[in-house]
Amino acid sequence: MYIHLGQETVIDDKEIIGIFDLDTSTVSKKTREFLANAEKKQEVINITNELPKSFIVCNKNGENKVYISQLLSSTLQKRAENKELDF
């Protein structure tokens, strides 16, 4: 099943490793380091022009991607649990 992450971005739910809230998770130094390293490796895909609220860590065929989304992590989690394709 596919999950709509925002804007026009849809991914296979099997690729998702984790969905994280930017406000609460970036308090941790380890999370900030993870995001900085992903940015250096060009693994970050910003899919919003609005204030980012969450990031989604994915892996497809051994390649990591980190999507930055304007949607709340709780909204994305519900979509993943309900297997919704919501545009």
Image: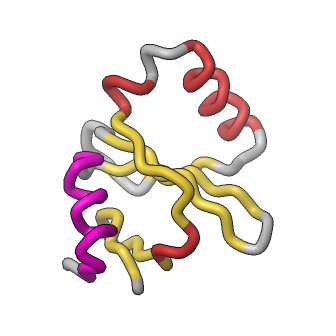
Residue 21 place in picture, x, y as percent: 34, 36
Residues in magenta, as a range: 72-85
The image quarter containing residue 8 is bottom left
Residue farthest toward the front in the current orientation of the protein: 81
The image quarter containing residue 1 is bottom left
Q: For the C terminus, give its image quadrant.
A: bottom left
| Residue 82 painted magenta | yes
Q: Residue at x 20, y 56 (%)?
A: 75
Numbered disc total: 0
| Residue 22 painted magenta | no
Residue 79 place in picture, x, y as percent: 25, 68
Residue 84 place in picture, x, y as percent: 24, 79
Task: State left or right for residue 85 relative to residue 31.
Answer: left
Residue 24 place in picture, x, y as percent: 34, 24
67 over 87 or under it: above or below: above
Its colouring scheme is secondary structure
39 over 82 or under it: above or below: above
Q: Residue at x 49, y 51 (%)?
A: 18
42 over 35 or under it: above or below: below
Q: Residue at x 33, y 68 (%)?
A: 80
Residue farthest toward the bottom in the current orientation of the protein: 1
What predominant SS class does the magenta segment belong to? helix
Task: State left or right for residue 61 relative to residue 31.
Answer: right
Q: Residue at x 22, y 62 (%)?
A: 78
